Image (spheres, coloured by chain):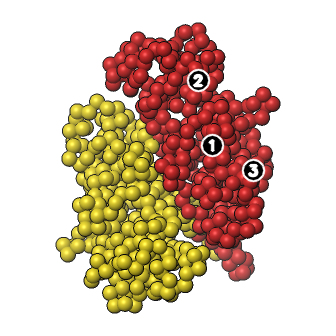
Chain colours: A yellow, B red
């Protein structure tokens, strides 16, 4: 019995340092030669598998960007679509390496789950979808049946916001965005509560999108971005700096189309450092010096990823809002790559 | 025996679950009953001892905020003045718990030094201080000038990059800090100062004749300044990160040093109640007591108050909030929700 006790303790003692050892997750990703990303189930603009079997979306492209920076190859990635209630267990059990699923950052999520919030790749806010012409403020929600996603923070936010405004409503909780669309189509609910971008995606899935509108106000801050497990500082580095590089590329005017010419001819030290002509950023991140160059050439800069999936190149045609560069009045700011 | 084994395994489960466990830095702070903060040796607005020997500044107030949050007493701080040359080593070898000394975040410092840049506390940018009568309006006018700067800083690199790009010939006059720069300018050993705009504001205000000098309006770099910690201590990283976030969130919610107590008593808003500890125990998973943010706000006020007192309207520097304003007011200060 004592031997079994000692064995169990030894097993746990060996396990515990592994939890805090730097680099273990990244090493595992390198050895299996692909990155596993937890994504949403069929959300237009963010994560959607097409009839050709290819995943497309804003979060999909960020996942490919990280894989490209790491491996030089955007195809070294697997997408795992997850329900809300599956996302934390999938990450904690190592079924996925990164959660890139428009997960809203909060203190609770940063501290209570054994997980780490890296950096937002999208700034959003909670709002409501309701029948077009019904009104643009919270009073228009009185008495409505509001569709909400099970396991999302939006349930509690909706309750708080409407309770504070003394507005009564009925909750209709469903699993997936597609279920919300069905419920709105058949009248089971006549409003929905979610991040503004998710509601825009939802609206595009409705039988009659023109019959509904997303309210203009935002009732919470929802900074969303990649989430990983605690313990791997090198993976945190990689994700943080890939996101920074995509923002920096837009700031420096580097696009998928001109990145090769920029690398060959630019005299700007910032450009040269980012694209690996000068400096040792790649070495510090333990990736190729061409990490940012290849990523930008493959996926484009932040603005190009946004335009393709959510902006003018997409059916959703979302405004950038807070998701513009700092010098254009938004929140996107990259720390220098040097 | 089986029960003992089960108890031991159960005791270890929180560690496996990754819930808040005290990291080494937190343990050391609790044992010492004080936080050791690396700060600037003497920079107006950021960290400086006033004539009564009291430390004052943005960095100083952030350290007081950390002490209030972690220990419950804002005065439990030991300030360790560090030069630019000393600052990283002091953090790497454990001499300080956190480096709050105005330090630009960049990839090397975040990734390659065993450290971790936590969260921006102040957005700044490189510029030049010139004589008003020099007629210089941009970096192109710096041809032939002698420029005072601190060697080994990002300001030296930026100066060289900007002026090399312009094909400008210049001489570098190395100084170790503000006092030498003031003396050098006074003796005309240099005619221009090169540093971040906030530092130039301090330099200008320290000169005997500030009205003879101006700071060029251009910003030749974007300097993101904030605290750094040693990497690998997740809990301490989170405490520093969320202390900063709480200071910014408090300003957004309208909680001030003066009204924190009545707010705690009377507010029905869940976001305010959560921040001040009246509901949801948000401090628990940080390893802090529920009223950590309340104590902090009563001690130093919110981010806007800290800024005003040290750098803004309530100080001799009179810096505009600019990028350091709330995100809803065109700035970059944006706290992730404390829920």
Q: Which residue is drawn at 45% across and 67% down?
A: A217
Along the line of sight, the residue nearer the viewer: B311 or B178: B311
Question: Which quadrant does the N terminus of chain B fall into?
Answer: bottom right
Q: Residue at x 62, y 32 (%)?
A: B317
Q: Which residue is drawn at 25% across and 47% down?
A: A255
The image shows residue A102 at horizontal and vertical percentages of 42, 66
Q: Distance between the residues labelled 1 and 2?
A: 19 Å
Along the line of sight, the residue nearer the viewer: A267 or B9: A267
* Residue B281 sits above or below residue A293 on the image: below
Label 2 crowd bin: few (<14), some (14–19), many (20+), radius 10 Å? many
**Residue B204: which numbered mark, if any?**
2
The image shows residue A183 at horizontal and vertical percentages of 37, 87
Label 3 crowd bin: few (<14), some (14–19), many (20+), radius 10 Å? many
Q: Do labels 2 and 3 share a chain?
A: yes
Q: Nearer the viewer, mark 2 or mark 3?
A: 2
Q: Which of marks 3 and 1 is in front?
A: 1
Along the line of sight, the residue nearer the viewer: B292 or A81: B292
The image shows residue B321 at horizontal and vertical percentages of 55, 42
Query: Which residue position is annotated with label 3?
Result: B299
């Amino acid at each position: 019995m004592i031997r079994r006790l000692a064995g169990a303790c030894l097993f746990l003692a060996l396990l515990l340092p592994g939890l805090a050892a730097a680099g273990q997750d990244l090493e595992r990703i390198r050895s299996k030669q692909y990155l596993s990303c937890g994504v949403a189930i069929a959300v237009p603009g963010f994560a959607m598998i097409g009839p050709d079997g290819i995943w497309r979306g804003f979060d999909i492209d960020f996942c490919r960007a990280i894989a490209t920076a790491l491996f030089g190859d955007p195809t070294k990635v697997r997408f795992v679509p997850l329900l809300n209630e599956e996302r934390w267990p999938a990450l904690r059990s190592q079924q996925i390496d990164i959660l890139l699923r428009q997960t809203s950052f909060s203190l609770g999520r940063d501290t209570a789950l054994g997980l780490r919030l890296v950096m937002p790749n999208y700034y959003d806010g909670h709002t409501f979808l309701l029948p077009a012409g019904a009104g643009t403020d919270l009073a228009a929600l009185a008495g409505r049946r509001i569709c909400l996603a099970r396991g999302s923070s939006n349930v509690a936010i909706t309750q708080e916001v409407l309770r504070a405004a003394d507005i009564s409503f009925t909750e209709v909780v469903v699993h997936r965005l597609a279920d919300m669309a069905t419920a709105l189509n058949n009248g089971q609910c006549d409003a929905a509560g979610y991040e503004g971008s998710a509601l825009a995606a939802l609206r595009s899935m409705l039988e009659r999108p023109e019959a509904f509108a997303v309210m203009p106000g935002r009732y919470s801050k929802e900074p969303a971005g990649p989430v990983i497990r605690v313990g791997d500082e090198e993976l945190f580095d990689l994700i943080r700096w890939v996101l920074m590089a995509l923002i920096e590329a837009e700031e420096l005017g580097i696009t998928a189309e001109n990145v090769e010419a920029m690398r060959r001819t630019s005299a700007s030290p910032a450009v040269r450092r980012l694209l690996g002509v000068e400096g040792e950023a790649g070495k510090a991140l333990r990736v190729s010096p061409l990490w940012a160059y290849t990523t930008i050439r493959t996926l484009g800069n932040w603005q190009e990823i946004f335009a393709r999936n959510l902006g003018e190149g997409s059916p959703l045609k979302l405004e950038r809002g807070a998701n513009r560069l700092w010098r254009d009045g938004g929140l996107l700011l990259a720390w220098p790559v040097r | 025996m089986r029960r003992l084994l089960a108890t031991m395994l159960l005791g270890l489960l929180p560690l496996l679950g990754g819930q808040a466990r005290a990291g080494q830095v937190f343990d050391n702070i609790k044992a010492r009953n004080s936080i050791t903060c690396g700060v600037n040796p003497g920079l107006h607005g950021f960290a400086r001892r006033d004539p009564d020997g009291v430390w004052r500044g943005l960095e100083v107030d952030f350290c007081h905020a950390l002490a209030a949050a972690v220990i419950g007493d804002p005065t439990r701080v030991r300030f360790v003045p560090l030069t630019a040359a000393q600052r990283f080593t002091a953090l790497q070898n454990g001499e300080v718990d956190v480096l709050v000394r105005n330090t630009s975040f960049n990839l090397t410092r975040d990734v390659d030094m065993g450290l971790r840049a936590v969260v921006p506390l102040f957005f700044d940018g490189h510029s030049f201080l010139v004589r008003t009568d020099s007629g210089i309006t941009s970096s192109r006018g710096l041809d032939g000038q002698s420029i005072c700067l601190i060697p080994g800083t990002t300001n030296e690199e930026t100066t060289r990059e900007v002026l090399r790009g312009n094909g400008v010939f210049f001489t570098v006059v190395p100084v170790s800090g503000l006092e030498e720069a003031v003396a050098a300018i006074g003796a005309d050993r240099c005619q221009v100062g090169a540093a971040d705009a906030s530092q130039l504001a301090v330099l200008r205000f320290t000169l005997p004749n500030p009205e003879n000098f101006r700071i060029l309006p251009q910003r030749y770099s974007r300097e993101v300044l904030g605290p750094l910690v040693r990497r690998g201590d997740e809990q301490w990283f989170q405490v520093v990160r969320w202390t900063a976030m709480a200071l910014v969130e408090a300003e957004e919610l309208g909680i001030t040093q003066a009204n924190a107590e009545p707010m705690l008593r009377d507010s029905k808003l869940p976001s305010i109640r959560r921040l001040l500890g009246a509901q949801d125990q948000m401090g628990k998973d940080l390893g802090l007591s529920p009223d950590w943010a309340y104590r902090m706000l009563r001690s130093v006020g919110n981010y806007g108050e800290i800024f005003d007192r040290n750098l803004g309207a309530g100080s001799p520097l009179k810096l505009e909030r600019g990028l350091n304003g709330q995100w809803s007011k065109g700035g970059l200060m944006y706290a992730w929700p404390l829920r």
